[in-house]
């Protein structure tokens, strides 16, 4: 096989990986505060405290708010997903074989992105529930109340991520399934979601589970969690003559961090799945 085939292979494969990652990878990246093009091993998300307005006397000095600036550092880690493609296998298959490998690498990296975001969310200290009941309307309203108490904006950027069993419980709440309450069905990163109580609800399979029945779900504002990306999904194709195969290495550099505890509430649910 001509070594020059590498260039065609690389371009085609990188296009496949990028497309697959955008369509079928992470569910949660667009639900949090995301920063791309980060240079270095870490980046900083700035949080600014609440300001207070005051009066002043005529010709007096305007009072300053002395806003508190608190940086939150987000470390980036490098992740890889690779596999071999034998040259003789390529003769027996068409470009679909490359798509299979491309999709597999993209799915793995997409799941890793969500894993990083969920790990950051897992640091939330505010919570409702005690794992003794499933996800009920009462529990949801309690979580929303906590957000409202902290003046978390109800600006259309509130999200909730729940498990499979909790999603089924939501489907048992009439308001959640009624078009009079939820309206049009939004799409989040290519996946169907629902809008209810001013919150976009997203189903996810890999939320924290302890003791086989204790599931942690999260309701949060997008700006409460930060995601940083130093390198999007990138593919490197290397020919190994001793193996008569190309090694396909998919890689990315990303990280996530909890920015503001006030903007996220853990919902402790009993999981019967």
Image (tube, grey):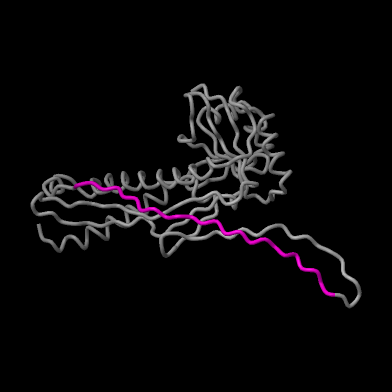
**Residue 125: where, in percent of width, then height?**
60, 40
Total number of numbered discs in the rendering:
0
Magenta stretch holds residue 65: yes
**Residue 138: where, in percent of width, then height?**
69, 29
Q: Nearer the viewer, residue 67 or 247?
A: 67
User: What's drawn in magenta, residue-wise?
Assistant: 61-84
Q: Nearer the viewer, residue 182 or 110?
A: 110
Q: Which residue lies furthest to the right in this view?
A: 58
Position of residue 29 relative to residue 269, above or below, is: below
**Residue 32: where, in percent of width, then height?**
54, 50
Point 46% across, 34% down: residue: 205
Q: Is residue 44 left or right of residue 85?
A: right
Q: Is residue 206 left or right of residue 151?
A: left
The image quadrant that residue 220 belongs to is top right
Magenta stretch holds residue 92: no
Q: Residue furthest bottom?
A: 59
Q: In this view, does 29 lie to the left or right of 96?
A: right
Position of residue 239 relative to residue 126, above or below, is: below
Q: Nearer the viewer, residue 78 or 68?
A: 68
The image quadrant that residue 55 belongs to is bottom right
The image quadrant that residue 45 belongs to is bottom right
Q: In this view, does 30 lie to the left or right of 221?
A: left
Q: In which quarter of the image is the N terminus?
A: bottom left
Position of residue 237 relative to residue 86, above or below, is: below
**Residue 60: where, in percent of width, then height?**
87, 75
């Amino acid at each position: 096989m001509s070594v020059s085939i590498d260039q065609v292979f690389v371009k085609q494969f990188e296009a496949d990986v990028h497309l697959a990652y955008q369509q079928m990878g992470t569910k949660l990246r667009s639900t949090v505060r995301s920063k791309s093009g980060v240079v270095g091993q870490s980046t900083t998300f700035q949080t600014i405290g609440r300001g207070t307005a005051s009066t002043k006397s005529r010709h007096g000095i305007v009072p300053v708010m002395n806003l508190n600036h608190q940086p939150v550092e987000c470390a980036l880690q490098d992740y890889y997903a690779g596999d071999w493609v034998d040259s003789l296998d390529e003769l027996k298959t068409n470009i679909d074989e490359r798509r299979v490998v491309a999709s597999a690498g993209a799915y793995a990296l997409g799941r890793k992105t969500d894993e990083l975001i969920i790990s950051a969310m897992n640091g939330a200290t505010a919570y409702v529930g005690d794992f003794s009941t499933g996800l009920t309307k009462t529990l949801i309203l309690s979580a929303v109340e906590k957000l409202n108490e902290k003046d978390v904006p109800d600006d259309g950027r509130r999200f909730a991520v729940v498990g499979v069993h909790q999603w089924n419980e939501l489907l048992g709440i009439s308001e959640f399934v009624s078009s009079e309450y939820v309206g049009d069905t939004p799409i989040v990163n290519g996946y169907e979601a629902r809008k209810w109580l001013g919150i976009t609800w997203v189903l996810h399979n890999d939320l924290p589970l302890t003791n086989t029945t204790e599931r942690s779900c999260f309701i949060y504002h997008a700006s409460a969690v930060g995601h940083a990306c130093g390198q999007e999904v990138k593919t490197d194709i290397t020919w190994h003559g001793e193996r008569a195969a190309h090694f396909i290495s998919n890689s990315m550099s990303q990280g996530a961090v909890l920015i503001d505890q006030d903007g996220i509430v853990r919902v402790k649910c009993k999981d019967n799945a």
